[in-house]
Image (cartoon, rainbow, N blue to C red):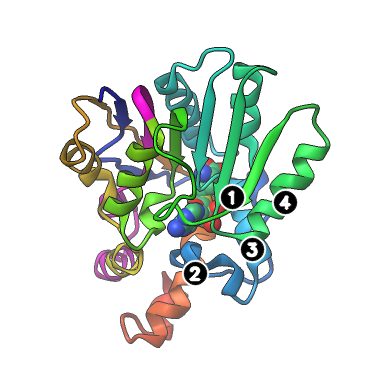
Amino acid sequence: MRITGRGWDQDGIRVATEHSNIESRALMPTQFQDVTQFSTIDGTKEPEFFRRFVDAANRSPGIIASKTAILAGLRLKGGEKVLDLGCGLGDDAFEMARLVGSQGRVVGLDASETMISEARQRAQARDLTVQFEIGDAQALRFEDDTFDACRAERMLMHVPDADRAIREMVRVTRPGGRLSVFDLDFETLMIDSPYVEITRRITRSFCDGLKNGWIGRQLSRLLKQRGIADISAAPHTVVMSCPELELLLSGHLDHAQNAGIITAADAEKW
Ligand SMILES: C[S@@+](CC[C@H](N)C(=O)[O-])C[C@H]1O[C@@H](n2cnc3c(N)ncnc32)[C@H](O)[C@@H]1O
């Protein structure tokens, strides 16, 4: 089997110290949710928060740049069959549908009904055929070798068994097909704050709260272990503004306080 896995390991995330009122501030919800809960969106207090979060994150220049690289890694041609695992709101699937054309087939799969129902609504507004379905990346219903290519973006960090999901990607992609995988490594989250110890506690507990906070550095090895011979891995840095960082971490601050990792006074001053 020859599948080109394109992964980004060592994904450093630097946070700019700017305090601009950028557009994402207007998108902020009244109540923040803990985004380590992305694996169980529908069971959270406010699933809609996660929809808004994905839309806001997907407007971030660093994420936009990563999407271009992920798409290039797929090397799609007209008529091909493609799978987007953890497709979220479906926008990347629409982009791929344009490339494979009417003779091709695009399937977007996500664990969350909230995400899939929004993706289906967005599909109705476009003249593109994309099949959206609810499912678990760790146990796909598709036959072996169904797809020519498969993408997964910022999903593996939320999956309980990332190796199982990668095995499934390999299984459903035909020999000679391509995988394009992008994920983050939250141990490399860097924040310029005057409160060094509080910052360390917050970023560490955020990373540890994810199912796979280290997945960025593990991608190449996991793909290799599943028999992928031709792997190209590239580091990618996402620089976040203060409002974007607030959106990412505010919900987690409540958890960190409840778990005794920081005090209410720490959270307030941070
Ligand atoms: C951060 S979002 C990224 C969405 C999309 N890939 C994008 O780039 O806009 C992560 C997505 O992974 C989905 N997800 C989490 N665990 C999953 C699983 N086990 N199987 C399928 N999707 C999953 C979530 O529901 C969520 O939509």
Residue 139 in the figure: left or right of residue 232:
right
Q: Nearer the viewer, mark 3 or mark 4?
A: 4
Earlier-in-chain disc, 4 versus 1: 1
Earlier-in-chain disc, 3 versus 1: 3
Residue farthest top in this picture: 78
Instruction: Compute the Cα span from label 4 to label 1.
Output: 12 Å
Question: Mark 4 sits on what residue?
Answer: 118
Whole-percent x, y for residue 207 in the image: 31, 62
Earlier-in-chain disc, 1 versus 2: 2
Residue for point 65% across, 60% down? 113
Q: Secondary structure at mark 3?
A: helix
Instruction: Compute the Cα span from label 3 to label 1.
Output: 9 Å
Residue 91 in the figure: left or right of residue 250:
right
Question: Mark 2 sits on what residue?
Answer: 34
Q: Which residues are magenta?
A: 174-203
> Hey, what amino acid is under mark 3?
Phe
Report whether residue 15 is seen: yes
Residue 258 picture quarter:
bottom left
Q: Is mark 1 within 8 Å of ligand 1?
A: yes
